[in-house]
């Protein structure tokens, strides 16, 4: 009986270890490519692109003023962009605050079609109904601010033929709570390092839901989706249609993050459930079409969805190392060490490329707590807990005066 248990443990080890080794090798490939990526955009002296900036807002009277003030101070001709806010099912002063800051405000009340995707879909139609001339559309979350060069970078990229562009989506004030620091590390590798590598290798950066820019005809030809993770689904549809999302690392959007793991739980559960839905609906098709077309772009997009959150990968890697020590097999131990060292290289490379401040490195000390929390989140999902509504997540500070 003992030999059977030992055999099951050994086979399980090499199966899980092999999958983890593939994931880590793939991430190291993207990491190596990222060091060869160009990280600045040559900008035009006289920009001409006309932008419509769309902001979905649900009870955002506290943080929305920061963004609207920020947008009024961009290094871009003011006559070339307008700001539209949809106050979606709001019960506070979001609409009044937006008007006071010069935005064009649209109030929407619909208790059936609830969520950010529906709000954006509705707002886009309002913009079209106004017949407002524009060349591109920007989508920003209400709890964000952007770099002053944001529209200049996007203007230059649109002028050279890029049609779908994702800015670098980062954490605002990551030096605060340790949970924000951990989230910052996760977004650095997910939203900066991996997109840089994909640009070198011919992939598509993906859409992150915030800081997205689209040539006007893209949104007319491919209608916005109102799914649980509308940005991921929209990206899947675009790349299957032959479009590619490009990465603008020097146009930055900083967003507020929850100050505790408990505050972030509903948001993360919604994201992960939506990602699981995208895996089921799109990954088989992406792999099939990618193999048929011999397209790295499509295969890479499928692999990206299949890679678990990094905290899950790290948690399993520690388990693999523990089993390797039990097995006392030099080859098994070597594989476990490769998996763990590869992840360290991956994380540190991302922090190096963005020149992360010391407090971000220090937040890595809390990684074990984050891993346990993330694994518990997955247990909740497996138990069938399904948060679906657009629930405003508690952020980590009050707005500036």
Image (cartoon, grey):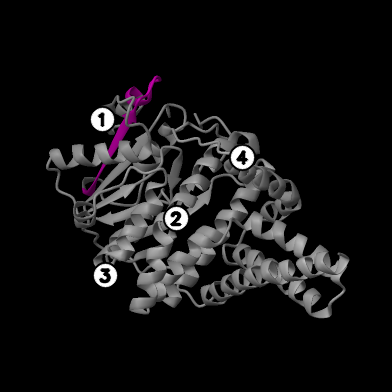
Q: In the image, which residues are magenta? A: 80-96
- Pointer 3: what residue? 160
Query: Which comes before the other along the chain, label 3 or label 4?
Result: 3
Residue 164 percent coordinates (x, y): 31, 60
Which numbered disc, 1 or 2, marks the residue that appears first in the sequence?
1
The answer for how far apart the CA atoms under marks 3 and 2 are is 35 Å
Q: CA distance from mark 2 to mark 4?
A: 19 Å
Instruction: Residue at 62% x, 55% y: name it.
Output: 185
- Locate residue 357: give its quadrant: bottom right
| Side of 255 relative to 17 (left or right) | left
Residue found farthest to the left: 131
Q: Are there few (<14), some (14-19), or many (20+) residues within 10 Å of tag 2?
A: few
Q: Residue at point 51% right, 36% down?
A: 386
Rendering coords of residue 363 (x, y %): 71, 50
User: Real-space Cα distance between discs 1 and 2?
Assistant: 35 Å
Q: Residue sitting at 78 percent across and 66 percent down?
A: 9
User: Front-most of 202 and 259?
Assistant: 202
Helix, strand or loop for disc 3: loop
């Amino acid at each position: 009986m003992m030999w059977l248990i030992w055999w099951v443990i050994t086979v399980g080890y090499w199966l899980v270890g092999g999958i983890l080794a593939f994931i880590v090798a793939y991430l190291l490939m993207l990491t190596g490519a990222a060091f060869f990526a160009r990280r600045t955009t040559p900008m035009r002296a006289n920009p001409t692109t006309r932008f419509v900036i769309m902001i979905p807002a649900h009870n955002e009277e506290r943080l929305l003023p920061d963004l609207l003030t920020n947008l009024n101070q961009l290094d871009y001709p003011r006559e070339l962009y307008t700001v539209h806010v949809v106050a979606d099912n709001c019960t506070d002063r979001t609409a009044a605050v937006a008007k006071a800051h010069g935005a064009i405000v649209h109030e929407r009340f619909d208790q059936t079609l609830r969520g950010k995707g529906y709000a954006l879909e509705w707002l886009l139609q309002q913009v079209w109904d106004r017949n407002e001339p524009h060349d591109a559309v920007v989508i920003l979350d209400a709890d964000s601010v952007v770099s002053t060069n944001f529209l200049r970078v996007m203007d230059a990229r649109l002028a050279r033929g890029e049609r779908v562009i994702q800015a670098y989506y980062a954490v605002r004030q990551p030096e605060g709570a340790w949970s924000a620091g951990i989230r910052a590390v996760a977004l650095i590798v997910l939203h900066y390092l991996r997109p840089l590598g994909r640009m070198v290798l011919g992939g598509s950066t993906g859409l992150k839901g915030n800081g997205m820019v689209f040539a006007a005809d893209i949104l007319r030809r491919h209608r916005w989706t109102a799914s649980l993770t509308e940005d991921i689904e929209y990206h899947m549809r675009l790349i299957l249609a032959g479009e590619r999302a490009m990465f603008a690392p020097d146009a930055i959007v900083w967003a507020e993050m929850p100050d505790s793991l408990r505050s972030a739980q509903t948001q993360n559960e919604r994201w992960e459930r939506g990602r699981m839905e995208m895996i089921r609906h799109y990954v088989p098709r992406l792999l099939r079409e990618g193999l048929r077309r011999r397209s790295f772009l499509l295969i890479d997009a499928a692999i990206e969805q299949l890679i678990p959150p990094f905290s899950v990968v790290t948690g399993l890697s520690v388990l693999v190392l523990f089993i390797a020590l039990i097995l006392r097999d030099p080859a098994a131990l070597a594989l476990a060490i490769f998996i763990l060292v590869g992840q360290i290289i991956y994380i540190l490379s991302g922090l190096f490329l963005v020149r992360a401040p010391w407090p971000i490195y220090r937040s890595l000390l809390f990684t074990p707590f984050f891993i346990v929390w993330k694994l518990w989140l997955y247990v909740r999902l497996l138990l069938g807990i399904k948060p679906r509504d657009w629930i405003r997540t508690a952020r980590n500070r009050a707005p500036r005066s």
